[in-house]
Image: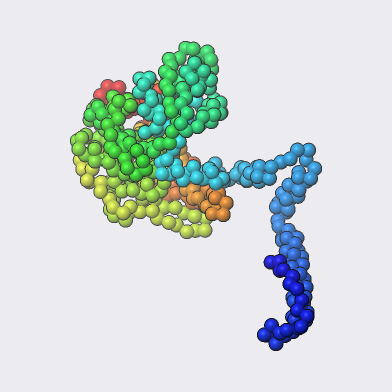
Amino acid sequence: MDRQNSPSDPNGFSDGSGQTNKTKRNRQIKIVVGVILAIVVLALTFFAGIMSAKLFYGDGLRSLLWFKDQIESDYYQDIDEEDFWQAAIDGVETLLDPYSQYYTADEYDAIVNADQGIMDGTGLSFFSGTNTVVRVALNSPVFFAAKQADISIETGVSLTGIGGAQDALVNTFTAKAMQEELAKYKSGDVVWLRFTDAGVQNEEQLVQAQSATVAVQLSTYIESYVLYAAQGKAWAYLYAQAGSGTWTDVSEYVSLDERATGKTAVLRLIEFNAGAAQEFERALEQFSSDGQENLLLDLRNNGGGSVLIFQKIAAHLLRTGSRNDVVMTAKYKNGMSVNYTVNESDFSRYFSGKKIYVAANGNTASASEALLGAMISYDTIAYEDIFLTDTTETEAKADGVARTYGKGIMQQFFYNSSLGAAVKLTTAQIFWPNGKTIHGKGITTQDGARASYAASNGEYGDPELTRILASIDGAVA
């Protein structure tokens, strides 16, 4: 802190400390000099610390810092420092498995919102690398808008055009082009989206395809993750705000109700996320009141989600289970094992005298596979109760080796509070209650699961589901 100089006192009065002003001034001078010397020593120590620290850096880090210095001093263009470090992080990611990733503060915020079901945009999700819709989020803008065009877009349909006006659609046939076009719009904007009934990949195919165009206003919404259908009706939780959903008849917005008219109800679990456990329990209550003989648990294209939600859902599905039973074990590289259990087991409440079947495919992964493992381990289902989508053969010969995805590992988020960033790392391998792990293998038809023909994992109109229900109900497919 700077100090102000004051006029000298010619009379040499004491300040009450027993020291004259002259003595005091000499002492002050010494103090100032001492402070200056201390600052110099601290500065030298600081820079010496940096230099000595560099001596202890590994060769890789020293090389990276040297590379960065050379770029800053000699490269013909300026490289933003943040871009440099992001590129370095991206490079490290290539050393890890596909599930481990670094997230910037904005990206992590989006994940936190998604874990609560809070989304923004149209509500469309796509098969990797394609313009084909894998699902329309329940309660999203497109979910309601699709009714305008009288088109079911639960699965298999393609998004082929995006525009700010109906007569200004930009054709999109790749995931990259589609994402670039959608990124031009923000929440509140109205866009026109064109859907076709097949996987259209070029202009010529687009001319031949049947299309429907709908106006959609992008907005924030709360996604639902369970769709239930029986007795010609379909139900889902619809949310006005987080945590306050209403169990609603959504038959006018989906086509699932058209199939569920026999003895089997369909419960489609889309992800283990947000309010899925509450929604699942409400669907089971509906199943009980409907009095259906069978339940088809549809896990096709369910890539997993939260372990906590998996535990809550598994608690309803253990035929021979009881409170505190283990439904999954995680084993870490240090030899530690962690058992994940259920707080209750109320299978008989919903399924006394009932039969459960499961539909799965090559995109059924992680928590979905763990749930299947728990159900098999506690005698809820046998392998032959699982219908596995077979895309390798023809309809007349669907007996290839169909499988689920085969993800028997678990990830964990590590948050950096000072940066707001996070990293997701694979930390453990997952084992079923019976000791089995399916990582890298999945559940297959060789295990005894039934092959279920489909041309792909997302055919428009979902003819595969129609065939599965016919098979369960004993009708002619």
**Closer to us: 426 or 289:** 289
Residue at the extreme right of the image, as rendered: 74
- Indicate left or right for 77 with 213 as reference: right
**Closer to us: 374 or 306:** 306
Q: Quadrant of residue 219?
A: top left
Residue at the extreme front of the image, as rendered: 11
Does residue 414 appear anywhere in the picture?
yes
Which residue appears at 28% of the width and 52% of the height? 344
Residue 365 in the image: state x and y as whole percent: 44, 39
Q: Quadrant of residue 7?
A: bottom right
Residue 232 in the image: state x and y as whole percent: 25, 27
- Indicate left or right for 2 with 470 as reference: right
Residue 379 in the image: state x and y as whole percent: 30, 45
Residue 427, compared with residue 78, is above or below; it is below
Which residue appears at 69% of the width and 83% of the height? 15
- Indicate left or right for 247 with 309 as reference: left
Residue 362 in the image: state x and y as whole percent: 44, 34
Which residue appears at 46% of the width and 22% of the height? 192
